[in-house]
Image: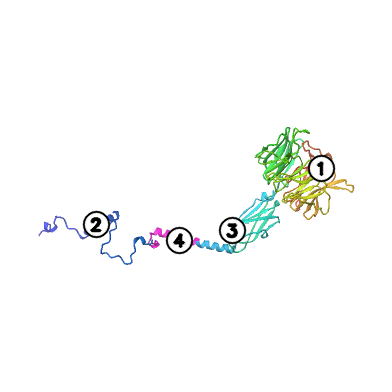
Amino acid sequence: MSTDGPDAGGSGEQPLTRAQLRALRAAETHDETEAALEAPPAPDAPPAPDAAPAPDAAPALDAAPRTPDPAAAPPRERRFTLTLLSVLGILTLVAGALAVVSLVQGPRLSQVQVDPAQAIEASGSRLILTANQSLDAVDAEQISVEPAVPFTVDASGRSIGIRFTVPLHDDTTYRVAVAGVTASGGGTEADLETSFRTPASSIMLLQRSADGADKIFLSDLSGEKAAPVFEHPRISDYRATSDVLVVAVEEEEGSHLLVMNRDGSDQRELPLPGEGYVSSVQVSDRAGLVGYSYSDRDLTETTGRASVLVTQALSGTDEPRIVQIDGKDANVAEWRFVPDSTSLLFIDFNGSLTVEDPTGDAGAQPMGTAASILGVNRGTYTALIERADGSFVVLDLTDGAEQPLPASDPDYGDAVGIEAFPGGTLRHVVQRDELGMPTGQAVVRVDDQGVASMIAEVSGEDSILQTCVSPSGQYAAVTIAPDLASNDYDDLLLPLPVTLHTSLIDLVGDRELPTLSGFDISWCRTAPLP
């Protein structure tokens, strides 16, 4: 009997094997799964009326969000989460360890700020110590400076500001220590220490020439590295600050006042009150001013201005200002800027001594009568004055109080000039015989206790023309005109001997310093008197 008839297959097709049936069912299952994934989600169907809620089920809106289980996350996300938690844990441990170390070690220095070059030029330079955390109150007794120098303290937050009230010595290592500082939140005490070294001094010196250009040289103290920074046929006067050089030169029509960098670059001219002549040039670092005595070129007994005192900004941003007393121009015989201030002190032709601050509103303040301004002290606002009766006094410029100038021991005689410096004075004295006749001259160093010692001396044939001292009182410069009787004078407005030598002297050590050709070293505040 045949098995291929209609009763066997129904349609004449071969029956499927078991393997084919299994493959067909697997394909149908795969198609249903893909359709379910691609189809949009069906709206939630309402529960059947007779459906009972699941035990302890809560409404969907009240369900709290679940914290992802790292173990249930994909492998990449799980690794990132574990790494982040590890880093946060390590940072927490490090922060805790640092806090413990800070409490155990106490504050430490994180930064030191100081300008050693500026510190040897002027008073008021600052050393700023910055700690790694805010500090408890710090006072001056906790601070020591070696070598010793006076200072003031201003501490706030993490910073301790130390202001040196006098200039510092050159080529010197200074050590500063602050003992027993604590953090503002308490903890272990610590000492903060630092040191810095000041640079070697550089000086300027003027050389006049009888048959060539006058020159201003920049040099070290040895004189071996001297180099000209400015030259002109007729240099009448100059002054130098830590930043600029101010030079007065003479032309046929009168003086010109030039300002430039210390190396002679970037020259610019300051306007004068008119066509005339300038002398007694001085500068004030603190006020940024230049001052000078000015006289008109066309001057008669009834017309023109003679020896009026003028001040103006070194920047050249303002016009010359003529100092006045009671609304009239002040004709001055002698004047000085007061160091470490913006004030100036002068004696007019009537002998009246006056102090004036051009930056204030008080105007000119009378200080009695005087024959000469011997010197002005740094940082104390006091002046050394020879009164009209010949007495020597220390004058307080704030209130006019005065006291006699202490005599020296031994007494070398009355001074004709005094240069004050931190720790004492240099006094230029004239030596005399039993009859009062001059026999020579000397420069005497007198300390604050009055102890005197001679540092320079010349015979009757030579003459001391100028005595100056470095800002800190470390060095002295004594300018000598040798053999004055045969030493020709130049022909400038204020003539000086052509041959001048300046001897450098170490006042605090035993360093041998040279004698240089020239005069008016940049330590000097005023020009030499002819």
Q: Earlier in the sequence, mark 3 or mark 1?
A: 3
**Mark drawn on residue 85:** 4
Q: Earlier in the sequence, mark 3 or mark 2?
A: 2
Q: Residues within 10 Å of mark 3 (few under 14, many from 20)?
A: some
- The total of numbered circles placed on residues is 4
Residue extent of the magenta highlight: 66-91
Q: Position of residue 442 (x, y in %)?
A: 82, 48
Q: CA distance from mark 3 to mark 4?
A: 32 Å
Q: CA distance from mark 3 to mark 1?
A: 62 Å
**Mark drawn on residue 28:** 2
Residues at circles 4 and 1 in contact by the CB criterion of under 8 Å: no
Q: Determine whether 401 is above or below 54 in the image.
A: above
Q: Position of residue 30 (x, y in %)?
A: 27, 57
Residue that carries the numbered disc 3 in the rendered image: 134
Q: Secondary structure at mark 4?
A: helix
Name the residue located 31 percent from the left edge and 67 percent from the top edge.
Answer: 55
Compared across the picture, whether 88 is left or right of 202 comes to: left
Any part of residue 226 in sight: no
Q: Determine whether 58 is above or below 515 in the image.
A: below
**Mark drawn on residue 482:** 1
The secondary structure making up most of the magenta span is helix
Residues at circles 3 and 2 in contact by the CB criterion of under 8 Å: no
Residues at circles 4 and 2 in contact by the CB criterion of under 8 Å: no
Q: Amino acid at mark 3?
A: Ser
Which of label 4 and label 2 is nearer to you? 4
